[in-house]
Image (cartoon, rainbow, N blue to C red):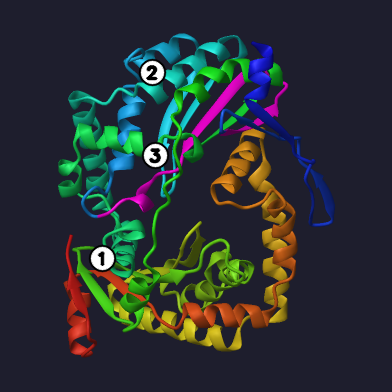
């Protein structure tokens, strides 16, 4: 039996990563990759007598469209409260052994997390194997999950920033990927059969990665994990698609969209596409965004909008580069009276930034801040394991851990201006504001398109 297990796995001992943070040399704990029955397992030995298991499935809202938006969130909710056929009351059982259990959905993954004492590790792996093989998708649990997802929609309707960002994504990316926003209609259309089909389609060996942080030795982990990897059927990983040309067409006219809401403040979001995480501009965009709006009070947007004029309490920018495509957002919340002025300032800042770029002092400040904060990606063994799983999902080499600081250091002001010249070439603007703001737009003869929920 031992020989059979050994032939079913390949162990890759990863060199201990070293990188420089500030003036110090940081040594990360040793991580091992175990390819077991065609499944990538990331293992780290811990001194605390516990076992934490992450099962990450490559599917999330970026894999959805307008017709099934929210299905990954619903699947996560069903499994959170239901578990598997053998463990239908999974939370009660996990609580009884002093463990923790959760299922979360994101843009790109659905992740099952289980934490137990080391003495309960074998049982934890067995439960996870049963969830993989026999997830409990039934009408009652689906109805509960649907209700919880609808509650999330209701809560978001009270948040102008969430409304503005979701509407911006929908306009730029259409009805799929970043533009797939769950709605009452899409949730009502999702059936138990749809959830089962989602599981069948995406829960396959090549599309699942497992992270383990435990005090148990590697041999014991390999023994316990066999039922879990055996429960996964063979199959290729199905990736999400990104229609870049369609997104480019959506932003080419630089149009303004208005969503009327009876609120005292306006929320403004400027949105456009960004490249994937594999882009050669990746580091320049990250450093450049930190200077533009990601670096709190030292950023350009904060200085121009809040510090100099006092127009906004909240303003900044975000760049998210994912496996196949990215997203850039600049935002501000301001009073109704200063909405149009703030929009113009944001546009002017983007125009000036892509031509003049940051100063050398700002460039150095941003690099040092990003390099010093990089260490927070690795605060615990669980963080490190999840980082390795993230690398694996994105098809990035382990050497990326070293390459990231080097890439940040290599960024020049010319690289930033070139990158943001593409960012500023086309975008859309979404404003969530009251009737007073709408009247200002009309009085100023600013062309806009009105949007609703």
Which disc, if any, is residue 202? Answer: 3
Number of residues whose C-alpha sits closer than 10 Å to that of mark 2, classed few (under 14), some (14–19) or many (20 or more): some
Which disc, if any, is residue 442? Answer: none
Q: CA distance from mark 2 to mark 3?
A: 24 Å
Give the mark nearer the N terminus: 1 vs 3: 3
Give the mark nearer the N terminus: 2 vs 3: 2
On screen, residue 301 versus residue 252, left or right, reads right
Q: Say which residue label 1 marks.
A: 264
Is 319 rendered above or below residue 14? below
Q: CA distance from mark 2 to mark 1?
A: 43 Å
Whether residue 221 appears in this view of the structure is no
Mark 1 or mark 3: which is in front?
3
Q: Which residues are magenta?
A: 39-65
Number of residues whose C-alpha sits closer than 10 Å to that of mark 1, classed few (under 14), some (14–19) or many (20 or more): few
* Residue 225 locus on image (x, y percent): 57, 20
Is 219 rendered above or below residue 239? above
């Amino acid at each position: 039996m031992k020989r059979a297990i050994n032939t079913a796995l390949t162990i890759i001992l990863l060199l201990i990563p070293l990188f420089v943070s500030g003036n110090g040399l940081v040594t990360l704990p040793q991580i091992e990759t175990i390819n077991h029955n065609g499944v990538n397992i990331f293992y780290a030995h811990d001194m605390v007598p516990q076992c934490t298991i992450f099962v990450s499935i490559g599917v999330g809202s970026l894999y959805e469209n307008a017709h099934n938006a929210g299905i990954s969130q619903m699947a996560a909710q069903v499994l959170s409260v239901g578990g598997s056929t053998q463990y239908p009351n999974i939370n009660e059982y996990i609580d009884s052994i002093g463990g923790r259990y959760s299922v979360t959905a994101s843009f790109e993954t659905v992740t099952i997390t289980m934490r137990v004492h080391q003495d309960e590790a074998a049982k934890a792996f067995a439960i996870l194997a049963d969830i993989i093989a026999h997830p409990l998708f039934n009408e009652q649990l689906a109805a509960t999950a649907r209700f919880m997802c609808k509650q999330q929609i209701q809560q978001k309707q009270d948040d102008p920033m969430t409304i503005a960002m979701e509407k911006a994504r929908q306009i730029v990316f259409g009805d799929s990927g970043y533009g797939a926003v769950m709605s009452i209609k899409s949730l009502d259309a999702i059936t138990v059969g749809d959830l089962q089909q989602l599981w069948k389609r995406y829960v396959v060996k090549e599309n699942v990665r497992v992270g383990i942080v435990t005090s148990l030795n590697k041999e014991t982990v390999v023994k316990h994990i066999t039922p879990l990897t055996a429960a996964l059927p063979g199959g290729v990983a199905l990736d999400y698609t990104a229609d870049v040309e369609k997104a480019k067409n959506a932003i080419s006219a630089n149009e303004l969209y208005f969503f009327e809401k009876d609120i005292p403040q306006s929320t403004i979001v400027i949105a456009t596409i960004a490249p994937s995480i594999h882009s050669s501009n990746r580091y320049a965009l990250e450093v450049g965004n930190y200077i533009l709006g990601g670096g709190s009070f030292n950023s350009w947007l904060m200085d121009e909008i809040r510090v100099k004029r006092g127009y906004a309490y909240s303003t900044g920018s975000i760049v998210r580069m994912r496996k196949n495509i990215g997203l850039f957002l600049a935002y501000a919340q301001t009073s109704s009276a200063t909405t149009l002025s703030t929009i113009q300032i944001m546009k002017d800042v983007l125009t000036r930034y892509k031509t003049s770029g940051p100063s050398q002092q700002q460039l150095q400040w941003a690099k040092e801040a990003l390099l010093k904060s990089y260490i927070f990606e690795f605060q615990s063994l669980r963080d490190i394991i999840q980082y390795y799983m993230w690398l694996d999902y994105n098809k990035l080499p382990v050497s990326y851990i070293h390459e990231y600081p080097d890439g940040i250091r290599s960024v020049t002001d010319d690289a930033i201006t070139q990158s943001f010249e593409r960012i500023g070439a086309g975008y859309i603007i979404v404003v969530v504001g009251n009737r007073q703001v709408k009247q200002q737009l009309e009085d100023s003869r600013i062309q806009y398109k009105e949007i609703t929920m």
